[in-house]
């Protein structure tokens, strides 16, 4: 029996005894009135009955207390079991939560470590590439310096030898001059005696003859020098340019002002237009682009002069049609989201262009301007493709000429960056690009090459010449750029007008789409030597007064025809 049951039994026993005492007291009071004789007998009977009642009450209270205690113990056991089960469940759930939190924390730490490791790995690779390129540059410079030292040593020896020869020849020339002077005096006296002319008259006659001979010789000398320069310079320049062109091949696509988007069904046109045209008005207002929906089967035309806005409109419209929810609020949300994504895409495009040309350490804003070139055009040619091609051409020609390849590529890529400056800033794009490059701390030679590639400022280095030549090569490729018929006709008329402005020209013909002009002259007024001079002068005027892609060949034709009639 447990402690609770024991105390409960004591409580019941005490209660029984109290009842017994009260009952006994009551009986005593009654017995006072009875006889003394009967009191003793009754008291013994009562005591016996009380003892029996006490025993019976104690037994009943024991059994009742025992049952109550057993019930309470069973209830307590059940509650204990429920509490333990609940605690076990809570412990298991807390264990799972802690395990999940630990796994998430582990994955998070792992991703952070991998991202940090990738960043450090990329930095190390970039530094290795940069060190490798610098080592190559140092090796090239050392080789160039050693070559120049050898040349300087050879030139010093040649200079000493030539100086000795010059001193010897000066002495011989002085002696011969004395002899010539003596002979000239004798010849003058004889001529005066033979011709009967005075010295001044003879001098005047000789001077006229000498002037004519000198003009003829000078024209011939100029022709010879020019022909020799053409042979040597043209061959070398052609070799460099042809090699650069052959090694750089790129696709050329003419930019247009419209994009055609295919749609799944004709029903979609009605959903794009919306009730009373509210959808199409909201789309055009959000993008700044005209949306043309006509009878063309399963096609919608997106029209606009800004390629970036046109691309935003195209991508946004594709997403709207794929989603199916087309209404003004959704249109504005999708257009804004697409515009932000394309702004981020611009930065990635700029980074890819720099990596393609192996150009490093570029300011982030310059990278963004390079990415903008994807959505700009130059005479219908994509500006980014054109700039990358110019960068490759500059690098190839710089290697052949022993110049800094990295600076040449950098200047070639950035030469048209001024075309991406906002329209609020005024000025030629070459000068705008130069100011932009200066703002972001580009090398002064690169800034000069950017500003001078259209002769807006004076060129300060050979890299500037390479950029101008590579720009002309890229723009003059067949199919690279388009030209309106009106500008094409005006250019041909200007060519013929310049040619006919020279004296002695009878006819002019601009042929080969303006790449060549043929000039027919009067043979009586212009001889062969003056024909060469005319070709040179006409080419100079075309360079100074006209703008054109590539180069224009000038051909002067002098023909003398004799006729006879037999009867």
Image (tube, grey):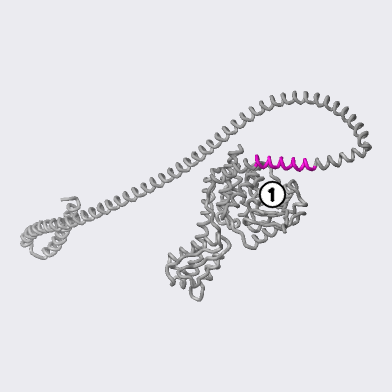
**Span of residues in magenta:** 215-233
Using the image, determine if residue 198 lies above or below residue 497. Answer: above
Q: Nearer the viewer, residue 229 or 456?
A: 229
Residue 414 visible in the shown view? yes
Query: Residue tagged by mark 1?
Result: 455
Q: Secondary structure at mark 1?
A: loop
Q: Is 268 above or below relative to 65?
A: below
Picture quarter with the C terminus:
bottom right
Q: For label 1, count other residues whose C-alpha is less than 10 Å away and answer few (under 14), some (14-19) or many (20+).
A: few
Q: Main secondary structure of the magenta part?
A: helix
Q: What residue is drawn where x is 25% and y is 53%?
A: 85
Image coords of residue 566 (percent x, y): 72, 57
Q: Which one is nearer the viewer's eye here, 556 or 55?
A: 556
Membership of 414 in magenta stretch:
no
Residue 33, image x, y percentages: 11, 65
Residue 372 in sight: no
Give the x, y percent position of residue 20: 14, 59
- Report the label total: 1
């Amino acid at each position: 029996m447990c402690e609770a049951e024991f105390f409960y039994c004591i409580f019941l026993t005490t209660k029984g005894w109290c009842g017994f005492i009260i009952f006994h007291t009551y009986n005593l009071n009654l017995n006072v009135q009875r006889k003394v004789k009967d009191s003793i007998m009754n008291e013994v009977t009562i005591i016996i009955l009380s003892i029996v009642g006490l025993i019976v009450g104690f037994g009943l209270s024991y059994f009742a207390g025992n049952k109550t205690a057993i019930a309470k113990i069973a209830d307590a056991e059940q509650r204990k079991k429920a509490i333990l089960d609940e605690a076990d469940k809570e412990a298991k759930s807390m264990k799972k939560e802690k395990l999940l939190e630990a796994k998430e924390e582990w994955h998070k730490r792992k991703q952070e470590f991998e991202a940090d490791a990738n960043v450090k790995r990329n930095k190390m690779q970039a530094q290795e590439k940069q060190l490798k390129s610098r080592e190559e540059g140092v090796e090239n410079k050392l080789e160039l310096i050693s070559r120049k030292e050898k040349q300087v040593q050879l030139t010093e020896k040649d200079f000493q030898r030539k100086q000795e020869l010059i001193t010897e020849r000066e002495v011989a020339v002085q002696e011969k001059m004395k002899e010539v002077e003596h002979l000239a005096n004798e010849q003058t006296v004889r001529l005066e005696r033979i011709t009967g002319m005075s010295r001044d008259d003879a001098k005047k006659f000789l001077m006229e003859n000498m002037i004519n001979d000198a003009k003829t010789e000078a024209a011939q000398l100029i022709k010879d020098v020019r022909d020799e320069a053409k042979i040597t310079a043209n061959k070398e320049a052609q070799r460099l340019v042809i090699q650069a062109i052959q090694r750089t091949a790129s696709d050329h696509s003419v930019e247009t002002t419209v994009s055609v988007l295919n749609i799944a069904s004709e029903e979609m046109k009605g959903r794009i237009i919306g009730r009373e045209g509210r959808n199409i008005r909201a789309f055009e207002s959000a993008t700044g682009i005209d949306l043309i929906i006509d009878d063309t089967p399963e096609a919608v035309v997106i029209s606009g002069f800004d390629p970036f806005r046109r691309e935003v409109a195209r991508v946004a419209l594709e997403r709207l049609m794929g989603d199916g929810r087309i209404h003004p609020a959704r249109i504005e949300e999708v257009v804004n989201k697409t515009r932000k994504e394309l702004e981020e895409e611009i930065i990635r495009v700029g980074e890819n262009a720099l990596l393609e040309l192996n150009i490093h350490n570029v300011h982030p804003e310059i990278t963004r301007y390079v990415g903008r070139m994807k959505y700009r055009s130059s005479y219908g040619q994509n500006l980014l493709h054109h700039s990358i091609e110019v960068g490759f051409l500059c690098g190839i020609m710089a290697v052949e000429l022993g110049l800094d390849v990295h600076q040449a590529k950098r200047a070639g890529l950035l030469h048209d960056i001024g075309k991406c400056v906002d329209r609020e800033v005024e000025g030629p794009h070459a000068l705008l690009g130069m100011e932009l490059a200066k703002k972001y701390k580009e090398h002064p030679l690169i800034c000069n090459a950017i500003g001078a590639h259209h002769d807006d400022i004076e060129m300060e280095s050979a890299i500037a010449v390479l950029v101008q030549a590579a720009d002309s090569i890229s723009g003059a490729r067949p199919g690279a750029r388009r030209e309106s018929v009106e500008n094409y006709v005006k250019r041909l008329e200007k060519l013929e007008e310049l040619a006919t402005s020279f004296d002695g020209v009878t006819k002019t013909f601009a042929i080969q789409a303006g790449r060549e002009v043929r000039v027919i002259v009067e043979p009586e007024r212009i001889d062969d030597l003056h024909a060469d001079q005319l070709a040179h002068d006409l080419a100079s005027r075309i360079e100074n007064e006209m703008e054109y892609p590539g180069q224009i060949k000038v051909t002067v034709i002098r023909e003398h025809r004799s006729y006879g009639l037999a009867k």
